[in-house]
Image (cartoon, grey):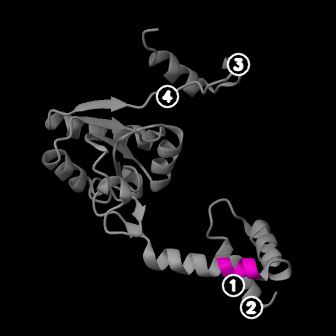
Amino acid sequence: MEAELDELVQALRCLPGVGAKSARRMALHLLERDREGARRLSRAVDEAVARIGHCSVCRTLTSAETCSRCADPERDSRVVCVVESPGDVLAIESATDFGGRFHVLLGRLSPLDGIGPEELGLDRLEARLQAEGVEELILATNTSVEGEVTAHYLAEMAARHGIRTTRIAQGIPSGGELEYIDAGTLAHALSGRREY
């Protein structure tokens, strides 16, 4: 394989879920069938890398110093939803009418991987809890072991400041059939049941 083609294939492999065959197929498609698309992709990646950084308040991705959510005076600053990634912000925004603020951890606690409170910038979250009049902290971390440990740590932090802590509901997806749900999800849903 030509060195330039090999370099393009290796570059495409940095994307999540893209293995060697998929990367090769993408590279060949761009070179054989869509060279203008390849140029557009190249320009878009260059622009995004050069201009997009993290919001100085919530740490989501933005091209401004402060993202549009944090700059919006209509959003309720008394309610902060903590998520693991900017993708989680987009998922919540597209699926709900949540009108509060966000705080993006950019990961989750994982002592085995060397990720502690410092690496997640939890001092910044604690400063927000002290300074912004937060009344409710919504924990929207993933349900992995690390996500649950992170949620527990954050709940303890909020409790020290007398802030109400809630956890997003988890369990059976809408339209899901019980016989096809994994045991962990089913057990979690049953133990987290609420009044009907």
Could you tell whether 73 is left or right of 94 in the image?
left
Q: CA distance from mark 3 to mark 2?
A: 51 Å
Single out the residue that lies furthest toward the bottom.
3
Question: Which three-letter amino acid code belongs to the residue tagged 2?
Answer: Ala
Label 3 crowd bin: few (<14), some (14–19), many (20+), radius 10 Å? few
Mark 1 vs 2: CB contact within 8 A: yes
Which amino acid type corresponds to the residue marked 1 in the rendered image? Glu
Q: Tell me the CA gap for discs 1 and 2.
A: 6 Å
Residue marked by disc 2: 3
Separation of residues labelled 4 and 2 (CA atoms): 48 Å
Of badges 1 and 4, nearer the viewer stands 4
- Type of residue at label 4? Gln
Task: Give the magenta-colored segment's residue range.
Answer: 36-40
Q: Considering the numbered disc 2 on the image, is that residue within a helix, a strand or a loop? A: helix
Residue identifier under label 3: 179
* Residue denoted by label 1: 7
Query: Is residue 151 one of those drawn in magenta?
Result: no
Q: Residue at x 66, y 24 (%)?
A: 176
Name the residue tied to disc 4.
170
Residue 98: mark in rendering: none
